[in-house]
Amino acid sequence: MKIKTIFWIAITCIFVQLLPLLATFFSPEFKLMLVSDVFGNEPSSDAITMFDQFAFVLSFVGLGFISMIFGAFSFDDLESLRKVSFLFFIFSIFWTLPDLLNIILGEPAAPIPIIILGLIQVGLFYYGSNKGVV
């Protein structure tokens, strides 16, 4: 599989993963639903403030990751693309790991489809770093 195709798939996965967080900026009801999953039916104003900061920071980290992937499209040689794919693989592990650990420990975590998208990214970046072609 072409590494740049892997990058496009990853960009799509990351964007879909970010959609719930981005939706909280425009839908107070959706934000309350997400916050209520962790903090109960009537979360405090501090809990909502904390979630707002979490969503804000994580959204920008995700958009930054997408920007880095777009930057990697400027590479044309196989060796560079494989190295960058490996670096994205490492970043994706740390992007996905907190939700995986929370699922294992039975703590609140992202929905299963979001976690699966993260695992798809990890696998694709690893594949790209080993067997990807230009």
Image (cartoon, rainbow, N blue to C red):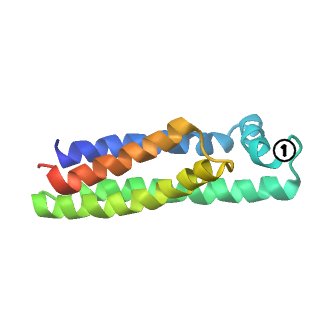
In the displayed structure, does residue 86 sit left or right of residue 30? Answer: left
Is 118 rendered above or below residue 129? above
Is residue 77 visible to us here? no
Q: Residue at 53% x, 45% y: name it.
A: 18
Q: Is residue 6 something that shows in the picture?
A: yes
Q: Is residue 42 left or right of residue 22?
A: right
Q: Is residue 48 left or right of residue 53?
A: right
Q: Position of residue 113 (x, y in %)?
A: 51, 35
Where residue 130 appears, as percent x and y from the top left, is 18, 55
The residue singled out by tag 1 in the image is 40
Q: Residue 82 location, x and y as percent?
A: 19, 59
Task: Quarter of the image for the N terminus: give it.
Answer: top left
Residue at the spot 20% in from the left edge and 48% down from the top edge:
3
- Residue under the image location 63 percent in, 56 percent down: 56
**Which residue shows up at 60% across the image and 60% down it?**
57
Q: Is residue 36 left or right of residue 126?
A: right
The amino acid at mark 1 is Gly
Q: Residues within 10 Å of mark 1 (few under 14, many from 20)?
A: few
Q: Position of residue 62 (x, y in %)?
A: 48, 54
Asked which secondary structure carries label 1, the reply is loop
Q: Quadrant of residue 120?
A: top left
